[in-house]
Amino acid sequence: MLALIIFGTRGVRSTIKEGQFFCPQCVSDQSYKHKKVTQFFTLYFIPLIPLSNKGTYVECQSCKNTYIERVLDMARVVQVEEKQRATPVEQIQNRLNEPAAPAIAAAAATTPQSSSTGSSKAEILSEKQKAVKKLLIMMILADGKVEDSEIHMFHKVYREVTNGIVADIYREIDQVKIENKLPHQYLKEAKSFLNDEGKRDIIKASMMIAAADGDIDPSEIRMVESFGKSLELRPAEVKELIAEITG
Ligand SMILES: [Zn+2]
């Protein structure tokens, strides 16, 4: 008899911290779980040996969006601003650290208003928004040309799946061109910052773009299935998602 040994690797998620934070998507205070993704060596699909840390993310327990850890600092900044700034001792220390008056004037002239903490809070995108945006642009760029109908479809799908808008799509397209990554390469990096909800929405979005021209050929389905594989989703689950979009 020939014994078949099945081994591989898989990312396993664990919670390292919990608390309250300001969720940019909910636009309110929510509970969060701070998760760590550890790559494990698996034998017969059972994780046995931890190999390396792949990433961490903060997951909103209400909308299930995931964010980089910096979102927790943002919440703290907002809280500090709400309380009355600094104590008298800190105020003196701050004054000692301040640059001389001409330097302040120069800095004020060159620093755009948008760098204040008030607006930066809204600039934090969820990891799902980042991944959907990049992958859809990679798909649009696949044939080397960008058509108006594709841009129109991008906005429609992005809004539907992530509840957000992209202000300057052409700047984003240029950025993706500079990074010059293949979808699989990108998704394998992005998966460590996404939960299953985010991964499923990425598959849905890519299928919606593939289906946008009215017909779906087998090569497009194979492509979306391979995206699912790069994201470590179960093949059966990906097939179900594809069937949902194709009807
Ligand atoms: Zn939320």
Image: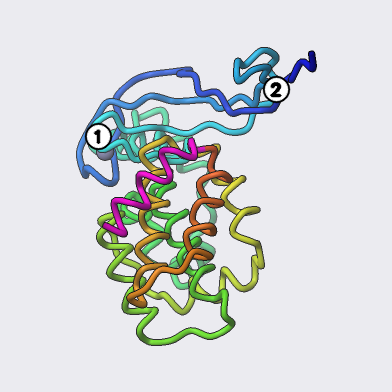
Q: Is residue 1 above or below residue 78?
A: above
**Which quadrant is home to the N terminus?**
top right
C-alpha gap between disc 1 and disc 2: 60 Å
Q: Residue furthest front?
A: 1
- Per the image, the residue denoted by label 2 is 6
**Which quadrant is home to the C terminus?**
bottom left
- Taking 52 as reference, is 235 left or right? left
Q: Which mark is residue 84?
A: 1
Q: Nearer the viewer, mark 1 or mark 2?
A: 2
Give SS at disc 1: loop
Going from N to C along the chain, the mark reached first, 1 or 2, is 2
Q: Nearer the viewer, residue 242 or 175?
A: 242
Residue at the (54%, 68%) spot, across then down: 138
- Taking 75 as reference, is 43 left or right? right
Q: Which residues are magenta?
A: 233-247
Residue at the (55%, 46%) spot, across then down: 190
Q: What type is the residue that disc 1 sits on?
A: Gln
